[in-house]
Every structure is written in structure tokens, then in C-alpha cells.
Image (cartoon, coloured by chain):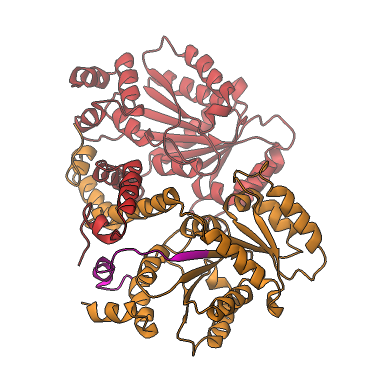
Chain colours: A red, B orange
Amino acid sequence: MHELLLEKAITGDRKSIARCISLIENESEGYEELLHALPELKEQHVIGVTGPPGAGKSTLVDGMIKQWVDKKKKVAVICVDPSSAFHQGALLGDRIRMSNWFDNENVYIRSLATRGSLGGLNAAVLEILLLLNACPFDLVIIETVGVGQSEVDIAKLADVTVVVLVPEGGDEIQTMKAGLMEIADIFVINKSDRPGADLLMKNLMEMSAPVFSRKEERVAVVKTIASQQEGIAELVKEIEVILEKPVDHQKKAELYASRAWQLIQKRRMRDLSYGKLVEDVRERMKGGGWRFYSWVDSFAPGRD
Amino acid sequence: MHELLLEKAITGDRKSIARCISLIENESEGYEELLHALPELKEQHVIGVTGPPGAGKSTLVDGMIKQWVDKKKKVAVICVDPSSAFHQGALLGDRIRMSNWFDNENVYIRSLATRGSLGGLNAAVLEILLLLNACPFDLVIIETVGVGQSEVDIAKLADVTVVVLVPEGGDEIQTMKAGLMEIADIFVINKSDRPGADLLMKNLMEMSAPVFSRKEERVAVVKTIASQQEGIAELVKEIEVILEKPVDHQKKAELYASRAWQLIQKRRMRDLSYGKLVEDVRERMKGGGWRFYSWVDSFAPGRD
């Protein structure tokens, strides 16, 4: 149905990529067919960038794009803001940033609205990553606001997770501490010309010492001033060091398995709707006595 | 397989009821068959009693049992403590209370350990209620500690929900307020000889006025001193007033539909295990390129 569209997306045509993503995002007719037609998975690096609102993630990502474009890399960026309904400003920021790269064939930037997943990362993100895997990008950056579950989700999707903080974000560290230490491969202290940067650096270095952290190696901490392009080259270098290490196959396998589980469950339940079940019960209750389990058995037989 | 057991449980044999409940609670072999063999649903009143730890719920329920036994009613009590692992004292309390009624053929009391359900009410409770529906009880009381989700779950299961508070529980009201107002049909101020009872009464009356609450009628507030049997007769009377009203068919239908949904989903997914999916992915990843969606399709075909 959408063969031609997919074919063009795979060659890197940005309009076709955009249309494919919209099909997936809206679960429009033919989107499962489209996904089914994707070629075999290839190696493609995914970098997660997360942190509290106002940490300067967008500016930082903008700087990262510049670094990689200068190195002749092709980069796709997916921005997910689970709270976007309340932060129109963030979307506006994306639009402004997007215009920097509008004419560059090697950069594709897309903001996603939220769908389904309760407070977590947009449920379509893995599917969009599968699509982008088929497209000629060397790197995919997923940027998300770290609120609750989403920063954990992003760590599952990404090969490298960058957690962005600001000097005055001491309180956030206190509340996010345990979770952050689990997921961060690299900490960025952005706006590091502000007071408190050195103290935050010291705290992060202590927290991320192998003795406190489950990870084998100390987590890198990089100071940046994204608005002045300061420290970005160092950040990109740290990312590349991690990308050169062997892939964590178990982590990838768990990611695909959990998404597969959700998809299989959704597909196997699609003949049913909760509303129809409720109506059905009401009909049966009107008729007087009814047997709950015989009714359930009519949709899925019991084991015995 | 367990026909005889069920037959005896249905006549009211308490040992057989206990064994049936254990089968269900542990999902032992034959439990689905047992449930499948249940007769048609009959009218049976379910009363939920919830509130914070230490509010005196057990003593109150003990007093309620006494009232109904005096009226020649047969009563079953299910105690669910989602935090029981941390509150051995509560279980001990149940055992002591249980001994009060041990020789009484018209009373059956059972404590449940938690199972599955994340922080919510024991997932087996609806199934146990279906079993008890087949047994000759006039009333079933479900007692649960109100922590987070469980008090909302109990309200879905029960015809009448009694929320038990104590005078010094002002803080709990503040945090539980919105949720409590949604679910309470009756508020009990237990230990009402303690200071603060009148203030709590006033606050509850104000909060439960129809103008603030979604309910059409003012929620009843009853003062009790359960340890001295004071106020229990009034409480029982308020409960009976509500039980005489017509059944809320929509609420019951939604309860059965949502449990059916869970059961159907569980049954339709039982050929799969997450662990096996992860292994399967790892095998495929070793083999080099693989197609995610073709793999998912092998478990459940896509729509297109």
C-alpha cells in the first residue's frame, strides 16, 4: 500500500520519512504493513539525551548535530516531550532549531506528540526507530524531558544515555538521584559558567564512583555552555568512546522482546473492546443469572 | 477434578471453602476448572471496609459480624493487606479475631496474602468473590488497608464502601481526600472518644456535602468506639439502608468486564513467556540482520 513511500524514505527522502513517521504515529491504515515491509535491522547508533525542563537540551542537541554534520555524518533527531501539552514553548524551541537545519539534507528533526503510554515515553518511538534504522542515518538522537518514567525508557532505547543538568539543579539531583545513576552513561553540566557548577561536578563524580554505582566504570561528567558551543566537542568525543565499545546485546534483546510482547498482546486482543464487554455483561445481567467463566471462556478457553 | 470439593463448599462446608480459596489464591492445577464449574451468579451483598493502618478496622468488622450473626445472617470476611509482608501484626490480629468465631458455622474469615497486582488489591479477590457467591453467605465483607490504589479497587468490588478514620487522622484525610470522597458511601470515625472527633466529623460533613461531592446524596458519617461495641448498630443500619437501594448495574458490569479483559489477555498470552522472547531475540541477533515485524507476525499476524 505504501511501498513507494517506504522506498523513497529508505533512500533518505525527508518528506517521505516524515510521512512514514506520521503514519506510524497516528497508526493510520497501512502502518503495520509499512513496518512489516522494513528491511533487516542494521547497525545504527541511538543516543538518548534527557534531563529536566530548562536544562538546555535543545541547544545542546543543536551543537551535537553541528559537530557530527561537520564530520560528514547523517543525523536524525526525535524530540519527545511527554508533557508537551503543557509546554508549548518547548515545541516552539524545536521549530526554531529545526529551521537551522532545514536546508541540510543530512539532518532530519522531528517532534513527537504523546500517544498512549501512561506517563512514559511515546509508545510509537520504538517503531519510529525501526523505520529510521532503514534510512541512511549514521546516528539517531532521541531527546526527551526527564519526568518520571521517560528517562528510564529512553535509557532502554539508547546505546548511550546523556543526562543533562544545570548548576542550580541540585534539588533535581536529590530526587532523581537513584534513577539517574542507573541510566546515565554521561552527565552533562550545561550552563556551567553559572555558580554551583563545580559543586555539582564534585557531587556527580562522587555519586558516579564505581563503589556507589552498579556500573563498572566511572560515569563521565562533561561541562558545557551549549549556547556558546563550549564543551560540545568533548561531549561528542565521550559519546564516540562509548559507541566504539561492543553492543550490549542483552539490553537490546530485552527492548525488542518487551515491545514485541506489547504488540502481540495488542494484536491478539484487537477483536475485543472494553466498552463492548461492558455492554455484553449488562445484557447478561438483565437476563438474570449468568456464569462469568463460561462467558470468559467464549473469548479464550480456560486451561483445564 | 475438584467437583466434590466445590459441591461441599457450595453447601457451606468451611473446610472445603478454605481449600477452594487456596486453589484459587495459588492458581493451583484445576483452579480454572473449578471456577468454570461455578453455578450462575446470585444476589449477594459485598461490603468493603477500608482505612489507614491502626484505624481499628478489624475490631470494627468483628463488631459488624456480631450484629449480623445476631440477626441470623451468614457472613464471610476476606482480609486483604497489600502490605502484609511488613505488618505481621495485622495478620496476628486476624488470627485472634478469627478465634472469636471459630465455632460459629455462620461465619467464615480468611486472610489473603498478596498476589501479582502491582500495589493494588489482590488479583484473586474477584475470583474468590465469585466462589463465595456460590456459597450460602448473605454478606461478604472485604477488609483492606487503604494504601494507594487498593481502596479504589475495593470500591469497585463492593456494593457499599465504608471508610474508617480516627480523630487524629487529620493528615490522612488531607492526602487521601479526593480519592476518599469518590469511594466512600459511609465514613466511620472510630475511637470517637478521642480528642478531635467532632472536628473530623464537621470536616467530613462539609467535604461530603453534595455541592463538593459528585454523589447525589450526602455521605453518612457514623461515630463508633468499636472496642466497646458503640455505634456499630448505627453503622450496620446505614449499610442496610444502602443495600436496599437498587443495584448499580453499570458499576457491576464494568467490574466484570475489566476482570474478563485481564483473564482473556492472560489466557491468550499464556503460550508466550517474556524470558523466551528475549532468548529468541538474542538467537536472531547472533544470526546477523533480522526483521522485527516478521518475527512479531509469527506470534500474531498484523492487520494488513
Q: Position of residue A271 (x, y in %)?
A: 24, 41
> Based on the displayed image, in which of its 4 quarters is residue A272 positioned?
top left
Look at the picture and state if A241 lies above or below B146: above
> Based on the displayed image, in which of its 4 quarters is residue B237 positioned?
bottom right
Q: Position of residue A225 (x, y in %)?
A: 62, 26
Q: Quadrant of the N terminus of chain A?
A: top left
Q: Residue at x 28, y 47 (%)?
A: A265
Q: Is-magenta flag for residue B33?
A: yes
Q: Is-magenta flag for residue A141?
A: no
Q: Position of residue A72 (x, y in %)?
A: 38, 19
A202 or A29, which lies in front? A29
* Position of residue A169 in the picture relative to residue B125 (left or right): right
Number of marks present in the image shown: 0
Stretch of the chain drawn in magenta: B27-47
Q: Position of residue B276 (x, y in %)?
A: 25, 56
Residue B146 in view here: no
Residue B22 in view here: yes
A6 or A40, which lies in front? A6
Q: Quadrant of the C terminus of chain A?
A: bottom left
